[in-house]
Amino acid sequence: MNRKAKFATLSLATVMLTGVIAGCSSSKNEGSSAANATPAASTSSSSAPKESYEIAIAIPVFGAVSKDMQAVQDEISKIAKAKINATVKIMPISIGAWEQQMNLMTSGREKLDLYFTFGAGYSTGVAAGKMVPVDNLLDKYGEGIKKQIDSAYLSSAKIDGKTYGIPVYKDYTTGVPGVLMKKDLVEKYKIDVSSIKNIDDLDRIYKTIKDNEPNVVPLGAGLSLPSQTYVWYDKLGDRLGVLPGYDNGLKIVNLFETKEYEDYLNKMHSWNKAGYFNKDAATTQASGADLLKAGKAFSYFIGLKPGNLEREIRTYGTDLVFAPVMSNIYATTTDTQAGLWTISTNSTNPERVMMLLNLMYTDKDLANLFVYGIEGKHYVKVSDNTIDYPTGIDKKTVGYSWDSWLYANPSIAYLMKSDLQDMWKLTSEANQKAIKSKALGFTFNAEPVKNEVTALKNVTDQYVKGLESGTLDPADKLPEFRAKLKAAGIDKVIAEKQKQLDAWAAANKK
């Protein structure tokens, strides 16, 4: 999942920091890379449909729209035209306007065929009838997709037994929870990174930074909080009823009533009182990574996945060191559904759109265009599978850029020379070795309790950031928070979630 951009809302930020933003089992995309991916998909020009069709694709954009977007779109259309007799129209939408614009487009009858969906909006989009069920389309036109994504993870996108979205190919795990720290300060104070095993071990390190670096807070937080990655439970989507230990005999509990949650809040409050957090942690729209980049923070929490360290170093322009605070990694539905590609019910030709999706998961030429742009103009090859920016061009001046975690299958694209070169092999291994949550594949349908969920969101919006940033004293505010959750109907929501989970478990023989 990638933290390169700031989200307009906390819900989107949570998705990206826990999921956003690669790999599968040994028979599914094992060690996939552009070196071993096939450039052609199952549909060839000889079998392409006779009638041409324009596929309109909506994508979120973090920052300015690339000035060479049209040129890249034209090259993508050449491949799509040759293979499936289709052209492509890319519609970039600023992340700040994304939710509003997508609601307008999907609610009306505007031209829209294919769009990226954040996990936070997936089930609600399905409930609103905005997405086409694609199981039959997958069987007919998506053979390449099914070869790329392990069935356990592909099935995790099912809602009430039907698939409405294809997960992006990524690390489908929680990642290794831990902290990224500035290497220069680690070395300056001779911090023994290997001695860090849990969050308690950070106390002495943060005290050292606090006592000796008056202009740097030990822990940057805000849009991203430690609680988004330091988790001991399956969130089951919204944390309104969770699965402790990713199993618990499939018995859901109220997270906010647990002793573990209370202990965690007390730890965060002790850090805040000691001055380890930035003072505006409960209100700022900056992430911990943003604060570190600005020279204002020593560390931030992350669920580390293969390639993350190298990308964070490149993105934030400073050497970093990682220390894990938990050892196991888990695979959950929430992480699998962090980002998906979905076919809009506005589409008049879902079959052709699925053909393009199949190409997006299997065709390396298409992947390189989407992710990096045009060879020679936006990148140059330095080896068979490695690229760099052309001479005189860098990340800030290149005419085309794309957040690769948005792409359907970035594992078949080239790697930048600064990337971890065996990233996709390690991603595949992580997905194989991850402990699968007992509820992997379960998606909660909040429709029967939508009023309660809305009321509970208002309560969590009022308390969670203050409590989990340590700003509010849990001795005072946690009982108040719990009481308001009760009044807003959390018990009813948990009962409904348990009922659905029981039915899902019976149907899937769990």
Image: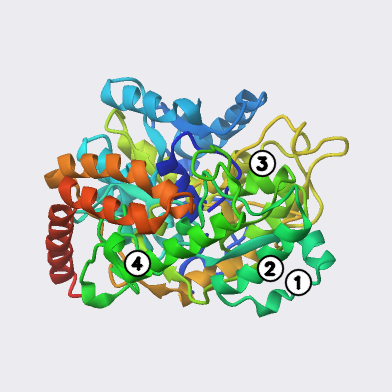
- Measured Cα–Cα span from mark 4 to mark 3: 30 Å
Labels 1, 2: front one: 2
> Three-letter amino acid code at disc 1?
Ile
> Three-letter amino acid code at disc 2?
Ile
- Measured Cα–Cα span from mark 1 to mark 4: 41 Å
Tag 2 secondary structure: helix
User: Residue tagged by mark 4?
Assistant: 152
User: Residue tagged by mark 2?
Assistant: 205
Q: Earlier in the sequence, mark 1 or mark 3?
A: 1
Vertical relation: 88 (above or below) 390? above
Residue farthest front in this picture:
476
- Measured Cα–Cα span from mark 1 to mark 2: 7 Å
Q: Earlier in the sequence, mark 1 or mark 4?
A: 4
Quarter containing the C terminus? bottom left
Residue 364 pos. (x, y %) = 59, 50
Q: Earlier in the sequence, mark 1 or mark 2?
A: 1
Q: Earlier in the sequence, mark 2 or mark 3?
A: 2
> Three-letter amino acid code at disc 4?
Ala
Mark number for residue 191?
Answer: 1
Residue 332 pos. (x, y %) = 37, 64
**Residue 38 seen from this side:** no
Vertical relation: 456 (above or below) 173? above
Label 3 crowd bin: few (<14), some (14–19), many (20+), radius 10 Å: many
Tell me if 309 is positioned left or right of 494 in this view.
Answer: right
Label 2 crowd bin: few (<14), some (14–19), many (20+), radius 10 Å: some
Tell me if 385 is positioned left or right of 116 in this view.
Answer: right
Mark number for residue 372?
Answer: 3
Label 1 crowd bin: few (<14), some (14–19), many (20+), radius 10 Å: some
- Measured Cα–Cα span from mark 1 to mark 3: 38 Å
